[in-house]
Amino acid sequence: MRLQRSLARDRNIQEKGSKMDTIIIKGCLNGGRGREDNPNVPWTPEEVAQEAIRCYDAGACIVHIHARNPDGSASYDPKWYAETSAMIRAQCDLVLNYTTARRAGVPVEEVTGYLLGTPNPVEMVSLNLGHGVRWPMDPQTGKRQTTMSHNSYEDIIATLDACYQRGTFPEPAVHDTGMLNNAITLMREGNIKSSRYFLVEPGAHWGDGRQSMVGSPRNYTMITDNIREFYPEATWLAHSNGDQTFVIGAIAIATGAHLRVGMEDSPFLPNDPCPTSNAQYIEWAVTMARALGREPATPTQAREILGLLPAIQD
């Protein structure tokens, strides 16, 4: 089944002609998103695997997934990742992309534990490059409070060590120019071993209490202009949050970059307040890309663009 799906996908791309510019489309299926936002957010291994296959069939070449407990809270269980990955791998050759994000108070060992503890290493992980600081509104008091997800230099180095022990590609996630500076520092000192790819994710909204760059076209351009200045040959994948997701995604498509879409980033689509599947986001991205002469990359092409190892058989 997996081989038949992969051959059919590659053949379809070839039939559309080699002159088409390829674009990596990543589906972000479920991270940090509650069912109060969208009741269709997948949580269980079975739900996530089914959504991943739907996204693959719609044109995604990478899926980004977060382990979730039955109540929807964040999980760091390697068994969840192993079970989910095995079900996806049985059906297709998607590039699998885990997360290293941690909730407040969660030690880095929880992340390194599942990176090192799954039977087979994952191909990619998104690597946050600094602390996450927010002033969320306390629903009980109606007042803002400070929350911080710690991610120190020492935590990042420990995460990178776990990645390189298993051949996992750490995806430098840049929320603002401060995190870009951290990425450049780690690259220059050899702690991040590649400077050819970034995840560009300005996602705050004005007035939301997040200490991060707002996902505006100006801020996106500021980050990517700086990437281009230091690493002219680099490429990047862009996304944002809420309605900004589709503005930043459209700019990325139109300017030769790659993009990520899904329920993690926005619980709604521009023309649908409650999508039933992440595949609908992929369909939106594919339609936009093809309108501008860009063809969705296959997983094989994405691995070539990013310099990933071939998919590991589970």
Image: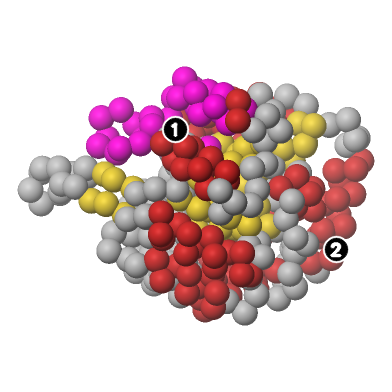
* Residue 143 rendering spot, x and y as whole percentages: 10, 43
Depicted 270 relative to depicted 66: above or below = above
Q: Residue furthest front?
A: 189
Query: Alpha-carbon distance for marks 1 and 2?
Result: 43 Å
- Range covered by the magenta-colored residues: 200-228
Residue denoted by label 1: 177
- Per the rendering, the mark at residue 4 is 2
Q: Quadrant of residue 81?
A: bottom right
Residue, x 90% and y 35% (percent of image)? 18
Q: Residues within 10 Å of mark 1 (few under 14, many from 20)?
A: some
Q: Position of residue 214 (x, y in %)?
A: 38, 30
Q: For numbered disc 2, what is the local secondary structure?
A: helix
Q: Image height check: is 72 above or below 209?
A: below
Q: Does residue 295 sit above or below 263 in this rendering?
A: above
Question: What amino acid type should be assigned to the residue bearing mark 1?
Answer: Thr
- Disc on res. 247: none
